[in-house]
C-alpha cells in the first residue's frame, strides 16, 4: 500500500492547463489547496473549456459491447496483470480506456462483481483480441473464465469531459467546475469542493440555499426544486449559494461534489 495520493497545491495551481498530463498525474488525481478547495485532474473533450461552468464525464462509447458484454478471450488467472477481450462490433480505438475501469459484469462464471483499474487497452480491430493491462498492483483477485465471464469497460469519468447538458438525466456523473479556459483535449483541473464561480441559469438563486445542475441551461447552476420524491440530475444537491448573480452571470457557489 502507498498512501496518501492527494496533491497539495498553491493558489493559482488550479488554473494551470497543459497539452499533456499535468505532472504526469493520472486522470482523477486529487489536488487540495491550502484553504481546503478540492480539484480533480481532467482532460477536455472535443470542445474548448469555458471558465466557471459545470462539466460532466463523457457518454459511454458507441460500441455497447463494452458496457457489460465483452467476452474474455482467455481465462484470467489469479494475480494476472492483464486480461484479453474479444472485440465485437466497432473497433477499439487508441487510449479510449486508459485510466478507466474494467468490471466483471456477467451473472455466470467466476470472478464476477469485481472492479479493476485499467492502465491501458490496446487498439484493436473488430473481431480481434485486445490485451487490457491493469493498473500496477490491481491484479485479478478471483480467476475469470474465458468464454464464460463477461466484462464491461468504462472511460475515466474525468476523461474527455463535456458541458453538463440541459436536462434531468445527463450522460455521466458530474465531473466539476472549470477553473479557466482551455483548448479542446487539454489537461486541466476541475473543482469539486469549496467556493467557486458558477454560471447561473435563468432562475434566481438564494443565498444559503441548495443549488443543483441546471436542467434548462447547459453548464449552469440552478435552484433546487422544492418538490420531494423527484429524481435526476436537476434534483441532486451539489452545493450552497454564497452570493447571487443575475441570469447568465456568475454566482459564488460553495461546491459539494465531494
Image (cartoon, rainbow, N blue to C red):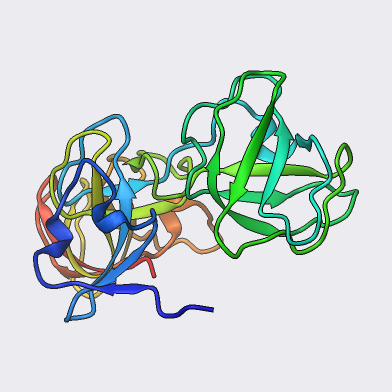
Query: What quarter of the picture does the C terminus occupy?
Result: bottom left
Q: Residue at x 35, y 60 (%)?
A: 224
As rendered, which of 210 and 51 lies closer to the eye? 51
As rendered, which of 218 and 50 lies closer to the eye? 50
Q: Judge whether 225 appears above or below 161 on screen.
A: below
- Image position, residue 8 (x, y; %): 24, 75
Q: Does the rendering let one see residue 256?
A: yes
Q: Does the rendering let one see residue 214?
A: no
Query: What quarter of the picture does the N terminus occupy?
Result: bottom right
Residue 237's quadrant in the figure? bottom left
- Tally of numbered discs: 0
Is residue 153 found left or right of 187 in the rendered image?
right
Q: Residue at x 9, y 64 (%)?
A: 12
Q: Residue at x 60, y 25 (%)?
A: 124
- Image position, residue 122 (x, y; %): 56, 33
Q: Judge whether 182 appears above or below 205 on screen.
A: above
- Image position, residue 251 (x, y; %): 13, 60
Residue 121's quadrant in the figure? top right
Is residue 78 found left or right of 237 in the rendered image?
right
- Image position, residue 84 (x, y; %): 72, 39
Amino acid at each position: 500500500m502507498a498512501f496518501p495520493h492527494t496533491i497539495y497545491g498553491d493558489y493559482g495551481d488550479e488554473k494551470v492547463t497543459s497539452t499533456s498530463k499535468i505532472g504526469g498525474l493520472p486522470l482523477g488525481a486529487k489536488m487540495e489547496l491550502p484553504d481546503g478547495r478540492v480539484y480533480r485532474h481532467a482532460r477536455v473533450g472535443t470542445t474548448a473549456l469555458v471558465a466557471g461552468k459545470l462539466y460532466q464525464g463523457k457518454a459511454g462509447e458507441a460500441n455497447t459491447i463494452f458496457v457489460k458484454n465483452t467476452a474474455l478471450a482467455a481465462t484470467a488467472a489469479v494475480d494476472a496483470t492483464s486480461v484479453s477481450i474479444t472485440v465485437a462490433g466497432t473497433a477499439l480505438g487508441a487510449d479510449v480506456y486508459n485510466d478507466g475501469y474494467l468490471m466483471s459484469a456477467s451473472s455466470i462464471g467466476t470472478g464476477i462483481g469485481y472492479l479493476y483499474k485499467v492502465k491501458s487497452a490496446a487498439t484493436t480491430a473488430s473481431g480481434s483480441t485486445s490485451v487490457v493491462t491493469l493498473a500496477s498492483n490491481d491484479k485479478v483477485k478471483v480467476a475469470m473464465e474465458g468464454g464464460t465471464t463477461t466484462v464491461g469497460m468504462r472511460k475515466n469519468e474525468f476523461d474527455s469531459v463535456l458541458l453538463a447538458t440541459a436536462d434531468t438525466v445527463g450522460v455521466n456523473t458530474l465531473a466539476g467546475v472549470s477553473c479557466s479556459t482551455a483548448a479542446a483535449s487539454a489537461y486541466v483541473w476541475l473543482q469539486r469542493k469549496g467556493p467557486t464561480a458558477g454560471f447561473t441559469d435563468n432562475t434566481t438563486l438564494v443565498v444559503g440555499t441548495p443549488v443543483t445542475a441546471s436542467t434548462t441551461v447547459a453548464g449552469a447552476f440552478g435552484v433546487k426544486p422544492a418538490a420531494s420524491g423527484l429524481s435526476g440530475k436537476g434534483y441532486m444537491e451539489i452545493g450552497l449559494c454564497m452570493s447571487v448573480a443575475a441570469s447568465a452571470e456568475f454566482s459564488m457557489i460553495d461546491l459539494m461534489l465531494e
